Every structure is written in C-alpha cells, then in structure tokens.
Image: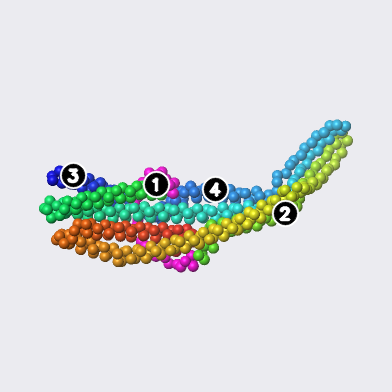
Amino acid sequence: MKCRSSMWLKASLLIAVFLHGAGTTLAAEAEISLDRLVSEALSNSPEIARASRRTDAARALVPQAGTLPDPWLNFEYSELNEREVEYGIRQEIPFPGKLRLRGEVASKEAEQSQQEIEAVRRRVVAQLTSVYHELSLTYRSLAVLEQNRQILIDFEKTARTRYVLGQSAQQDVLRAQTELSRLLTRIAVLQQQRESSQAEINRLLNRPPRSPLGRPISVPLRPLRTTLEELSSWIERTSPMLRGQASAVERGDRALDLARREYFPDIELDLSRRHDLDMRTNGFRLMLSIQVPLYYRSQQREGVREATALRSAAQHELQATRQELLFQLKDNYVRAQRAEQLIRLLSEAVIPQAGLTLRSAQAGYAVGSVDFLTLLSSLLTLQENRLELEMETAEHAKARARLEEISGELP
C-alpha cells in the first residue's frame, strides 16, 4: 500500500512541477500586438521586396520597348585607283505603330507586376494574421489546460484520500493519474505548435527562426458587418489579382495588334558622305532598305496565332481567377458565420451549463452521491467545450483575415 501511494505521489509531483513551469513561462512573456507585427512584415518581408524589385524591372522595360534601335556609324577608307573616304549613319526604323505597341505591351506588363505587389502584401498580412491567431490559440488553450491541471491535481488528492479511508476504489486514483498524464501530453503538443507558429511568424518578419517573439494580445471578436453580396461586388474593383489578370488581357490585346503589324516591313535608312582625296571632290549616298516578310507563313502568321492563343488564355485565366476568388469569398464567409454562431452558443449556453454540471458533480462526489467517473467526465466536457470556444474564436479571426485579403476591405 505504501509503495503504490508513494508512486502516485511522485507522479503527481512530477506532473505538477512540469506544468507549473510551463505556466510560469507563459506568464513571464511580454505581449506583442498584431499591428506591430504587420508593420514590421510590410517593411522587412523578402517576398514583398522581391515583388517590388520585379516591378521596378518591368517599369524599366517600358521606355526601352518604345525606343528606336541604336544606330550604326560607318567609316570606310578605300585605295584602289583613287583614295576615297566614306562615313555615315545607318538607322533601322520599325514600321509605324510598332514602337507604340511594343511600349504599350511593356506598360501592361508593368501594370500587372504592380498589382502583384499589392497581392503579395495582402497575402503576407493574411498569412501573418492567421499564424498570429494560431499562436494566440495555443496560448489560450494552454491556459485552459493549466486551470484543469490544478483541478485534476485536487481531484487526484481527494480520490487518494478517499481511497486511503476506504471510501472509494483504487481505480479512481488511477483515472486521475491517467488524465493528468494525458493532459501533460496535450500540453507538450501545444508547446510544439507554439514553437512552430513562432518560427513561422519570424519567417514572415524576416527574422531568425529562434528570435524571441512574445505573447499575442487577445483580440476581441469582431462580427461580420457586410453581406456576401457586398464583398462579392468589391472584388471586381479592389482585388489586385483580378486587376492584374485584367492587365494581362489588355497586354494580350496589344500583343495581338503588334503581331498583326509584323506583316508590314521595317525599313533601314543609310546616309553616308564621300570624299575623293585625289580629285578633292565630295558627294553623298542615300540608301533605303526594306525588310521583306518572305517567310510570313512560318513567322508572322504563326506569331498571330501565338498572340491569339495567349490572349485567349489570359481571358480564361481572368475568369478562372474570378471564380476562385468568389468561391474563397463564399467559403470563408460561411466559415466566419458558423464560427460566430458556435461562439455565441458555446459562450452563452454550453459552457455555463457545463460549469454548473461540474459544480454539481463536485458537490455530489464530496458526499458520495456521485462516482468519480461522472465527476471526471464533467471536468473533461467543460475542458473540451472551452477549447472548442478558443478554436472557433481563432477560426473566425482567420476567416476574417482571408476575407480581407480577397476583398481588400474590412468585412
């Protein structure tokens, strides 16, 4: 009897010490706000910087595309029957309209790249917000389990005392010990999830993975303020993905016009001046060359087919993007609505009722009218309901973040 009681006592002390240490760590951490993290991510994110540099490169192509090719300077000295010197300039001139269309194609590419910056910014903010609420969920879940740890330790002590006095069975003590061990396992899992979430946030902030972060500030529930129809109407004018795809379609239109204009020949102008050194006479030469589209069947015609296919692909991509965004909008809107309903039900009905059930079971167990299994089941039911409330609160916040990423507005 003494050996078994000693083993139970040691196990209880080990669990209590481990979990008390975890709770002390949570309490000692400084708090960090989401707004501060978002501001840092927008300033330091390598994804945003990469998109910005690509846009700078695309903008630099616009003036290049609309500029004439560099001219050639010619110099020739000949000494046959007479000594002659010839020098001049040669310039290639595309058919009228080609340079303008090339510049417009490059300009639409730059517009599409510009929209990519905003899309990346929104994606980074949405990812950061989602991971922030995941991290907040682990902290709040750990707090729930820490409270239950204290209650379970009291349960285990009570069951052990009743067992020593012969008022309850040994299995009550073993069940309490088992639930304490299971709680220890769940806490270990949550601690791993907390470390992973912190590393993910540091990645988005462009920090080393093990940089200290802090404890998230609890964000109050913000119910949806807009309808699904309003959000759907916003994305046509606010979604950078749709605006970027629209620019791609316009680029396809310009590229098709340019491909059709390739049927018309470019010209080359060669102007040179001659000096006869022996006769001491001067003259000039003007030569006009025209590029003949002789192989139009395998070049220009196929170029038009290529441009037509790319333009059609851009149109289909625009429609596919629109349908995907509308689906994501509906899916996350429904998720947020469901979370609001469950949060209201859990906080106003289920959890208060589970709390009353637990208190009633505690009172009944104290006088012997309720068995330990009923008491333990009441505690675990309340625990799961509280954890579900925290999970739905996090899911609601993450769904709102995705809605804001898609629509560009606070839903």
The C terminus lies in quadrant: bottom left
| Element under disc 1 | helix
| Element under disc 3 | helix
Query: Which residue matches tag 4?
Result: 53
In the image, what residue type sits under mark 4?
Arg
| Element under disc 2 | helix
Q: Which mark is residue 199?
A: 1
| Element under disc 4 | helix
Q: What is the C-alpha distance between the residues marked 2 and 1?
A: 54 Å
Left or right of 348: which side holds 163? Answer: left
* Residue depicted at x 66% and y 55%: 308
Query: Which residue matches tag 3?
Result: 7
Q: Give the mark toward the camera: 4 or 1.
A: 1
Instruction: Give yes or no for contact between labels 4 and 1 (Cβ–Cβ under 8 Å).
Output: no
Q: Main secondary structure of the magenta part?
A: loop
Q: Give the magenta part as a residue range.
A: 202-231
Q: Earlier in the sequence, mark 3 or mark 2?
A: 3
Q: Give the mark toward the camera: 3 or 2.
A: 3
